[in-house]
Image: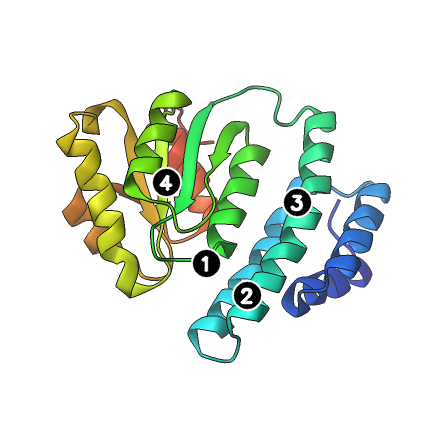
Amino acid sequence: MSIPESIAKPLYDAFIEGDEDAANELTQQALQAGLDPLEIINTVIVPALTEVGRLFQLGEFFLPELMMAGEAAEVASKHLEAAIIVSGQASQKLGTVVLGTVEGDVHEIGKNIVATMLRAHGFEVVDLGRNVSPSAFVDAAQERKAHVIGLSSLMTTTRPAAQHTIQLFSELGLRDQYSLMVGGGSVTEEWASELGVGYSPDAAGAVELCKRLVGINPS
């Protein structure tokens, strides 16, 4: 069932405006109307938060707007994830993914979208949050027996932190035990290739990449 414009437009606007209350109420209304939670994620949340990220990059939005949008999305995501579990769409665990925004970077919107979509598709996600040190990534990977480690870096100035994290896995002799991937506004496919790690420019692609990294052929 496609999402009616009467629900999609105000919900989209709620994320753009960072309105937690509206996002909470409208998400519940959409679910009560029988709408597919995955479709809500793919056709409303992802485009809205992608637009927020674009406006931030252009300097039209600032950190408060970025954080408010992320918080609105987090509120909505809790309802959507619960609905996905109830519907049985995510009954099979495909693998464990550790996600975090690298040290020195406090931006989480892109990472949060990826986390939500991974959970929706059946992955267990260990979200370390933002400003995560290289050693914290290593510790979480070992403790949670992760399959994939995802590093998010929005700011160009924090790309070295992503690189240091990858290097730490190598220095500890752990590089071959995990599949690593990078993403975020500062990351390019060329740079990821130089580091020898996976890359996706968007959340949907990150899900497909994770499936490939754990040995599943994406449909």
Q: Earlier in the sequence, mark 3 or mark 2?
A: 2
Q: Tell me if mark 2 has few (under 14), some (14-19) or many (20+) residues whose alpha carbon lies within 10 angstroms of its own.
A: many
Q: Earlier in the sequence, mark 1 or mark 4?
A: 1
Q: Nearer the viewer, residue 77 or 161?
A: 161
Circles 1, 2 touching at the beta carbon (< 8 Å): yes
Q: Nearer the viewer, mark 1 or mark 3?
A: 1
Callout 4: helix, strand or loop? strand
Q: Earlier in the sequence, mark 2 or mark 4?
A: 2
Q: Amino acid at mark 2?
A: Leu
Q: Position of residue 117 (x, y in %)?
A: 55, 41
Q: Earlier in the sequence, mark 1 or mark 2?
A: 2
Q: Tell me if mark 1 has few (under 14), some (14-19) or many (20+) residues whose alpha carbon lies within 10 angstroms of its own.
A: many
Q: Earlier in the sequence, mark 3 or mark 4?
A: 3
Label 1 – label 3 distance at C-alpha: 18 Å
Q: Nearer the viewer, mark 1 or mark 4?
A: 1
Callout 3: helix, strand or loop? helix
Asked whether residue 48 appears in the rendered view, the answer is: no
Label 3 – label 2 distance at C-alpha: 16 Å
Q: Which residue is mark 3?
A: 77
Q: Nearer the viewer, mark 3 or mark 2?
A: 2
Marker count (numbered): 4
Q: Which of the numbered marks, if any, corresponds to residue 107?
A: 1
